[in-house]
Image (cartoon, rainbow, N blue to C red):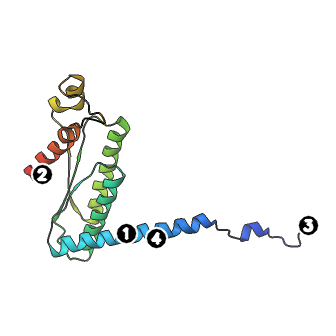
Amino acid sequence: MSVFKVNPIDIIDSVVVGTVNQVSREKLVAQAFSSSVADIRALIENERAIITSLCSFGKDSTVTLLIVMEAYRQAIAAKTIEPERPLIVSTVNTKAEAIPMQMFVNYASKRMLKYAKSVGINIQFKLVQPSLNNEFFIRYVGGQKIPATPTRSGDCSVILRLTQTNTLLTLL
């Protein structure tokens, strides 16, 4: 029986060695994010660039979009760019993605727009999609296209994504 009324387990904070390594990785990621934000700020402040971010709302393009939005937020707050400067964001609904991903794009884009408005970013968001006769189902099930295999490349990305994005960019 202990003479102490406090259990040492309740006051001793133990750290697992893997946690220390995780913290240092998180710091490296935060530094890389900050460095990328600084690079984009230099671009929009010094070159007066208007950024176009193509975002699928997958992990890679979302991080890129977050970097650009943070750069815009900081530059607007510092009054080094005008708040009217647009940030153009587009995503392509290929109509070939899994239904949860299509739902997530709608969910995430609404929150992105709400956040941009709250911090004064003039975001121009466009959701584009292929025409009916270029939809995945029509082309592949209808026999107009043959799916790609490891030995033969396909043009799915060109038809479903790139053509739609290029059409949007020519309209801007």
The answer to whether marks 3 and 4 mark residues whose Cβ atoms lie closer than 8 Å is no
Return the residue nearer the eye: 95 or 109. Answer: 95
Name the secondary structure under disc 4.
helix
The answer to whether marks 2 and 3 mark residues whose Cβ atoms lie closer than 8 Å is no
Q: Is residue 105 left or right of residue 54?
A: right
| Mark 4: amino acid | Lys
Label count reads 4
Mark in front: 2 vs 4: 4
Whichever of labels 2 and 3 marks the residue nearer the N terminus, that label is: 3
Q: Position of residue 134 (x, y in %)?
A: 17, 32
Distance between mark 2 and mark 4 Cα atoms? 36 Å
Locate residue 16: give its quadrant.
Answer: bottom right
Distance between mark 1 and mark 4 Cα atoms? 9 Å
Return the residue nearer the eye: 129 or 154. Answer: 154
Mark in front: 2 vs 3: 2
Q: Which residue is mark 3?
A: 1
Q: Which residue is mark 2?
A: 169
Name the secondary structure under disc 3.
loop
